């Protein structure tokens, strides 16, 4: 079992490295252990998967900071060495709320978090995505940095400017956020090499990409050469898990016998991810057999 600081240093090693990795999308202790056992260098807990796991709700920022931080704590407690990076959305409010968010998720054992400059939750109106001014976005990042207790905890400035306000604004935000003191920059909506090239030309921090929507953006060697150190692939695992639950429950409801169910795990999987051998050892050592 590594210390929280050890895990944060592992995340920093990824950001300060020379290659681009894909994180494992996780949402609870068991999914995190699976990702760790498989060998993912970093786990990613997103706001969308938090809404699904905690509330069974779409990604509309209806999860509270308390609920989010508690799920972060459960995930971090379950893994031994894998760092967890989380999407803390807008920091659950203004710059002062962002400070509180940093305190809560850092205390939960998280290795790094993103703070975005989107106006959230959705305000009354036509539903169009709106960004905070660069000044407000910068203030939120600086407030988060001021609230950080462990210097190894990673704070990432995030923006969806590419798809909301255009590449020129995204480039300007890359330039400003690079000088904010943040540890990395997170961009969503980057669809072309021309867009990434423009951002990379001014960014002086490691880059994280939220999804690779086109074939030309899936070349990890190219991404690494442009400063991208983490590239998300989406959050398919939780969707696949829900399909498995649905199909298993439906089969049982339709009369399929438990022994005849399809898609059941191999016998060794559940004992491995529940750390059954550890519990057997502790039971013998501390409960007399």
Image: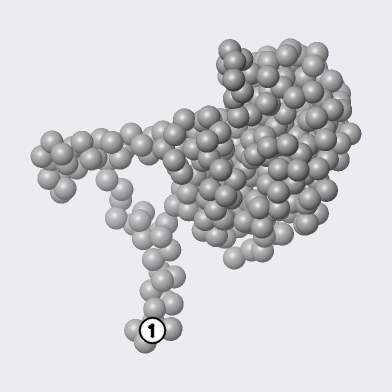
Residue 288 in percent (x, y) is at 37, 87
Q: Is residue 97 left or right of residue 267?
A: right
User: Which is more toward the observer, 26 or 96?
Assistant: 96
Q: Residue at x 79, y 16 (%)?
A: 169
Q: Is residue 177 left or right of residue 117?
A: right
Relative vertical location of residue 23 with respect to residue 133 in this rendering, above or below: below
For residue 149, say whether it is visible: yes
Q: Residue at x 77, y 57 (%)?
A: 150
User: Which is more toward the observer, 89 or 212?
Assistant: 89
Q: How is the image coloured?
A: one colour
The residue at the far front in this view is 124
User: Which is more toward the observer, 159 or 139?
Assistant: 139
For residue 14, say whether it is visible: no
SS assignment at label 1: loop
The residue at the far bottom in this view is 288
Q: Residue at x 60, y 36 (%)?
A: 22
Residue 47 in percent (x, y) is at 56, 37
Question: How many marks are shown on the rendered structure?
Answer: 1
| Picture quarter with the N terminus | bottom right
Residue 284 in percent (x, y) is at 39, 82
Residue 261 in percent (x, y) is at 19, 42
Q: Residues within 10 Å of mark 1 (few under 14, many from 20)?
A: few
Q: Residue at x 66, y 57 (%)?
A: 107
| Picture quarter with the C terminus | bottom left
User: Which is more toward the observer, 122 or 38?
Assistant: 122
Which image quadrant is residue 92 in? top right
Relative vertical location of residue 286 with respect to residue 136 in this rendering, above or below: below
Q: Which residue is mark 1?
A: 287
Q: Is residue 75 left or right of residue 239?
A: right
């Amino acid at each position: 079992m590594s210390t929280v600081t050890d895990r944060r240093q592992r995340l920093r090693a990824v950001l300060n490295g020379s290659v681009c990795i894909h994180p494992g999308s996780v949402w609870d202790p068991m999914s995190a252990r699976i990702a760790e056992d498989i060998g993912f260098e970093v786990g990613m807990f997103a706001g969308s998967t938090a809404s699904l796991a905690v509330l069974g709700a779409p990604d509309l920022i209806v999860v509270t900071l308390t609920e989010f931080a508690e799920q972060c704590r459960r995930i971090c407690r379950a893994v031994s060495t894998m760092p967890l990076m989380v999407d803390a959305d807008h920091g659950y409010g203004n710059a002062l709320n962002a400070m509180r968010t940093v305190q809560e998720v850092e205390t939960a054992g998280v290795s790094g978090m993103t703070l975005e400059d989107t106006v959230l939750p959705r305000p009354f109106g036509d539903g169009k995505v709106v960004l905070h001014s660069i000044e407000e976005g910068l203030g939120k990042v600086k407030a988060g940095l001021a609230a950080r207790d462990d210097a190894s905890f990673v704070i990432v400035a995030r923006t969806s400017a590419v798809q909301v306000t255009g590449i020129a604004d995204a480039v300007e935000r890359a330039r400003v956020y690079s000088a904010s003191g943040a540890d990395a920059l997170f961009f969503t909506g980057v669809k072309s090499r021309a867009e990434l090239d423009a951002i990379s030309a001014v960014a002086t921090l490691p880059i994280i990409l939220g999804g690779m929507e086109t074939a030309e953006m899936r070349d990890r060697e190219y991404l690494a050469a442009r400063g991208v150190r983490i590239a998300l692939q989406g959050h398919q695992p939780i969707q696949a898990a829900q399909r498995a639950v649905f199909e298993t429950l439906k089969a049982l409801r339709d009369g399929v016998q438990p022994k005849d169910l399809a898609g059941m795990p191999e016998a060794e999987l559940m004992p491995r991810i529940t750390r059954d051998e550890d519990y057997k050892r502790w039971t013998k050592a501390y409960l007399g057999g």
